[in-house]
Amino acid sequence: MSRWHQTSCKLPRVCVVGGIPFCDACDALGDCTNVEPDLSSGIPRAPELSTEGLQNLSWPPSVQYEQDTCNIDIPGALSCAPSLPQAAPLLVVSRPSQALYTPVGTDDLRLLLLSKGDFDDPIHGTLKVSSFSDNVSFDALSYAWADETGDDSRRAIIFLGPFWDPFKITANCSAALRRMRREDRDVTVWVDAVCIDQGNHVERNHQVGLMAKIYSSARELFVYLGEGRKELEEVVTQLQWFETAKSIDPTLIQALFRCRYFSRMWIIRGCERKGSHHPLRSQEHQMD
């Protein structure tokens, strides 16, 4: 998505006015409420050319010819040739600005400094590259890209960097980040959809291989199961009070493991992490 500031804006001063980012330096509004959802996988495909007007012609084998290049310009010589549609430029829908992603090394990870804000405020953050050897304190988010209806389209908007560049994520990821955000201070988090350059296949494959290390290096691992399901709220509350799940209603346990979250292959890596796991509650506007 394109930058919403005036082209002359070099030192943005962004604040939120009526729930919409506003730059006081160039008087521009970052209103992204009517953005079309990204339904693609993010992988560009070559456009298909029309075969209309083309004929399967070949040079007669009985006629000799030479393959010399003819440089004679004959006006109108191509006027009867069918016009072929030009290939449209390849576009990656919702591809972020290259300025958002700086390269990561083999022992690096990219983290999101999630700006403080109220629950309903636009989500803003800043990306930074850190090394595992720096022992940076951060929290990791484990969630499912798709919600319980299976919607994995990138229709939600967050803003990144000093220019508040818009960046598309899934609605489930957006809801999880709202639960992780604090009202009183910024927090450093790792979330795959934002911290991995999904359009860079080399980086994505390498970072996916580091996910177990990322989860084990995190200060806390926060698990997001979804919104507005009372049975999940109840079972999570009971799990926090009981040392084991033996005293919990089995139907609640079944409801818990029917969540789309537990159908993910990557959940095993998150569960393998030793240490604290914290659920992100859907009835509260802050972390546990």
Image (cartoon, rainbow, N blue to C red):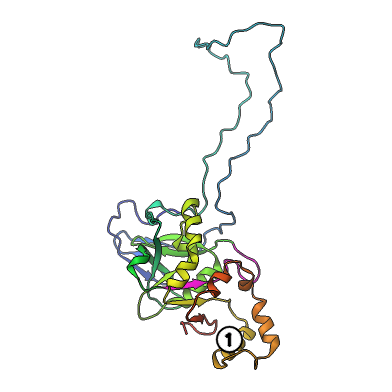
Up-down: is 125 above or below 102? below
Let me know if residue 52 appears in the view: yes
Query: What residue does disc 1 label?
Result: 236
The spot of residue 217 in percent (x, y) is 42, 71
Residue 145 is one of the magenta-drawn residues:
yes
Name the residue rendered at 68%, 90% in the picture.
Answer: 249
Label total for image: 1
Q: Nearer the viewer, residue 40 or 276?
A: 276
The spot of residue 42 in percent (x, y) is 55, 52
Amino acid at the residue labelled 1: Val
The spot of residue 51 in percent (x, y) is 68, 31
Q: Main secondary structure of the magenta part?
A: loop
Name the residue rendered at 47%, 85% in the picture.
Answer: 288
Image-based side of 135 in relation to 283, left or right: left
Up-down: is 278 above or below 105? below
Residue 262 is one of the magenta-drawn residues:
no
Quarter residue 137 falls in: bottom left
Residues in magenta? 139-152
Name the residue rendered at 36%, 81% in the picture.
Answer: 184
Up-down: is 152 above or below 116? above
Looking at the rendered structure, the secondary structure element under dot 1 is: helix
Quarter residue 48 falls in: top right
The spot of residue 152 in percent (x, y) is 60, 63
Image-based side of 106 in relation to 10, left or right: right
Q: Nearer the viewer, residue 166 or 275?
A: 275
